């Protein structure tokens, strides 16, 4: 290959990866809408695509209407973003832009007010004891942010929350608010958020019985968490199956 052809091939490869990210993220929006994990026209999910640029859902577009082509492409370091005609929701900008800028491991960031995770975040004790395989998946991986002080409408709030996501933490349970997960890929973050909601549902269902919990020994919980992390292509296969269902039933998400 000649030197003159290399830049074009690099650009083409980047565009292909960008298109794949749009499709995967749009699929995640559509699926969370099906699972009733969305909230009105609120909440947001994003993925870094190159450098400081990231894709995120447009302002006030219902999850069930998000398409690959409708996703906004923003620059985390662009101070004029909120002044532009197609500006994102302000809370989405202040949270996601600062987290993408501060956390290279957070290629994908998903934030929802899903029913069970939010209910758990509203308890005085929001910890998740390991009582089954799904709750044990998150053993040692959850940070509880007790600093809710209204909507996230400043760079400082985004920076504060980014600082909480220390090494090994993948879930930020936002007290009085909701949940945020990070992942190295869209599939990883999607799978993490899906399972955290299921884990929270199991825990709250057990609490509702009023009976004592059967909590695993710590060594078993740690083992189970490690086993989840080493479970191969589980997350990628999960998202691939979701896309296959959407391809058959509502292929417009790829537009």
Image: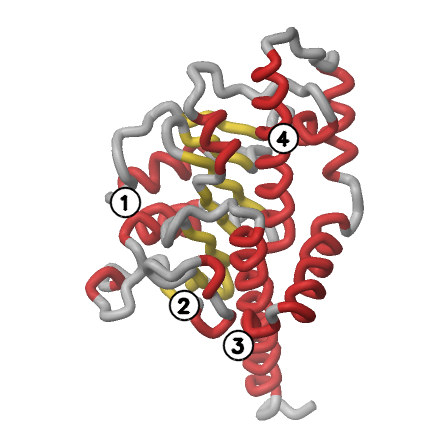
- Judged by depth in the image, the label closer to the viewer, 1 or 2, is 2
The residue that label 4 is drawn on is: 199
Q: For numbered disc 2, what is the local secondary structure? A: strand
Dots 1 and 3: beta carbons under 8 Å?
A: no
Give the distance between the C-alpha atoms of the residues marked 3 and 4, in whole angstroms. 33 Å
Tell me which corner region of the image, top left, top right, bottom left or bottom right, holds residue 196: top right
Q: Which mark is residue 239?
A: none
* Sequence-first disc among 1 and 2: 2
Residue drawn where x is 47% and y is 48% of the image: 38
* Sequence-first disc among 4 and 2: 2
* Sequence-first disc among 3 and 2: 2
Can residue 10 be seen by looking at this rendering?
yes
Give the distance between the C-alpha atoms of the residues marked 1 and 2, in whole angstroms. 19 Å
Number of numbered discs overlaid on the protein picture: 4
Q: Residues within 10 Å of mark 3 (few under 14, many from 20)?
A: few
Dots 3 and 2: beta carbons under 8 Å?
A: no
Q: For numbered disc 3, what is the local secondary structure? A: loop
Give the distance between the C-alpha atoms of the residues marked 4 and 2, in whole angstroms. 32 Å
- Judged by depth in the image, the label closer to the viewer, 4 or 2, is 4
- Judged by depth in the image, the label closer to the viewer, 1 or 3, is 3
Q: Is residue 117 above or below residue 15?
A: above
The residue that label 2 is drawn on is: 73
Q: Which mark is residue 155?
A: 1
Q: Which mark is residue 255?
A: 3
Q: For numbered disc 1, what is the local secondary structure? A: helix
Give the distance between the C-alpha atoms of the residues marked 1 and 3, in whole angstroms. 33 Å
Q: Residues within 10 Å of mark 2 (few under 14, many from 20)?
A: some
* Nearer the observer, 221 or 78: 221
* Sequence-first disc among 3 and 4: 4
Q: Is residue 114 above or below residue 3?
A: above
Give the distance between the C-alpha atoms of the residues marked 3 and 2, in whole angstroms. 16 Å
């Amino acid at each position: 290959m000649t030197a003159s052809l290399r830049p074009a091939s690099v650009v083409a490869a980047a565009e292909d990866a960008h298109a794949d990210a749009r499709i995967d993220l749009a699929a995640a929006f559509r699926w969370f809408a099906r699972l009733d994990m969305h909230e009105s026209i609120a909440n947001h999910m994003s993925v870094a695509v190159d450098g400081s640029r990231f894709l995120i859902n447009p302002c006030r577009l219902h999850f069930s209407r998000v398409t690959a082509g409708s996703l906004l492409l923003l620059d985390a370091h662009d101070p004029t973003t909120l002044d532009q005609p197609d500006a994102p929701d302000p809370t989405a900008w202040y949270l996601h832009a600062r987290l993408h800028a501060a956390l290279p491991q957070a290629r994908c960031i998903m934030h929802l007010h899903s029913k069970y995770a939010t209910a758990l975040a509203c308890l005085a004790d929001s910890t998740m004891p390991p009582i089954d395989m799904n709750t044990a998946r998150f053993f040692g991986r959850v940070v509880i942010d007790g600093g809710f002080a209204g909507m996230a409408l400043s760079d400082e709030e985004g920076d504060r929350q980014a600082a909480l996501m220390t090494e090994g933490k993948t879930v930020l349970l936002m007290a009085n608010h909701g949940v945020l997960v990070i992942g190295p890929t869209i599939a990883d973050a999607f799978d993490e958020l899906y399972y955290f909601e299921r884990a929270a549902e199991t825990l709250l269902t057990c609490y509702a019985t009023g009976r004592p919990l059967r909590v695993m020994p710590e060594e078993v919980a740690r083992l189970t968490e490690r086993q989840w992390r080493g479970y191969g292509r589980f997350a990628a296969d999960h998202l691939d199956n979701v896309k296959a269902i959407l391809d058959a039933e509502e292929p417009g998400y790829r537009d």
